[in-house]
Image (cartoon, coloured by chain):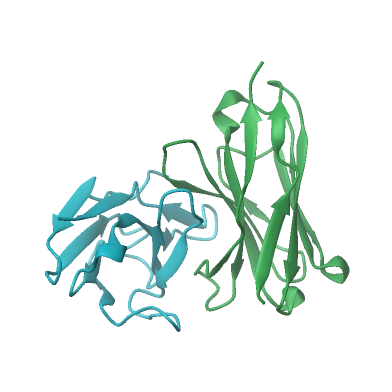
Chain colours: A cyan, B green
Amino acid sequence: QSALTQPRSVSGSPGQSVTISCTGTSSDVGGYNFVSWYQQHPGKAPKLMIYDVTKRPSGVPDRFSGSKSGNTASLTISGLQAEDEADYYCCSYAGSYTLYVFGIGTKVTVL
Amino acid sequence: EVQLVESGGGLVQPGGSLRLSCAASGFTFSSFEMNWVRQAPGKGLEWVSYIGSSGAGARYADSVKGRFTISRDNAKNSLYLEMNSLGVEDTAVYYCVCSRASRDAFDIWGQGTMVTVSS
């Protein structure tokens, strides 16, 4: 099972919106509505930001939103803030054999 | 406070073995599925293994299948990962992760324990 494809980096100015794509196949992203997104600051454990494609855990700002179309899922950060600068990983359920596959990760830079 | 605390990491020679432990507190451990996720230095996240809430249904990534064994002791609120035939490619921070919000979401993470495989 190959890692999901994400852009290596995206950037934006404070207040702007950025979108991170996560492309897989019909065996993972396209086949199930079980895509999640994780934020990771340097030296820290990842933090769940979005699950089941669009759901946001309690405590996660509503600036973060998720969506999916076909084999590509997306995370949008609206009203970018300095503290949003981090690495972001998508993850998808990939069936009862492989279970889960992560994306390669995207570094978000706030200019 | 909801918490997962890993232990057992360290330096091991290629071909060696190590057993990781994860102590859970602040939530009903026995009700939730658990996973191990690892991250090699400077690299991305990699799902390693899954176990059901009762201890059944273990699953493994192809990269560790046949070498790693996941288990849990719900009476002790603990998760384990037995790692054998370790190779340099297994060098990583290993995170204990709970799927509480949804079966397919990793919403509680430990701080991680570092495993270094080197001669």
Q: Is residue A63 above or below residue B37?
A: below
| Residue A73 is at least partly visible in this image | no
Residue A92 rendering spot, x and y as whole percentages: 41, 61
Image check: A25 left or right of B71?
left
Residue B56 rendering spot, x and y as whole percentages: 74, 64
Q: Identify the image quadrant of residue A48.
A: bottom left
Q: Residue at x 64, y 36 (%)?
A: B115
Q: Residue at x 71, y 21 (%)?
A: B13
Q: Is residue B75 above or below residue B46?
A: below
| Residue B16 is at least partly visible in this image | yes
- How many labels sit on residues? 0
Q: Is residue B29 above or below residue B81?
A: below
Question: Which one is nearer the viewer's eye here, B39 or A85?
Answer: A85
The residue positioned farthest toward the top in the image shown: B119
Image check: B37 left or right of A2?
right
Residue B108 rendering spot, x and y as whole percentages: 57, 68
Q: Is residue A74 above or below residue A23?
A: below
Image check: B90 left or right of B31?
left
Question: Which one is nearer the viewer's eye here, B100 or B24?
Answer: B24
Q: Residue at x 86, y 66 (%)?
A: B76
Q: Residue at x 63, y 30 (%)?
A: B116
Question: Which one is nearer the viewer's eye here, B11 or A50?
Answer: B11
The residue positioned farthest toward the right in the image shown: B75
Which part of the image, by quadrant, shows the C terminus of chain B?
top right
Which part of the image, by quadrant, shows the N terminus of chain B?
bottom right
Residue B111 rendering spot, x and y as whole percentages: 60, 55
Question: Which one is nearer the viewer's eye here, A29 or B5?
Answer: B5
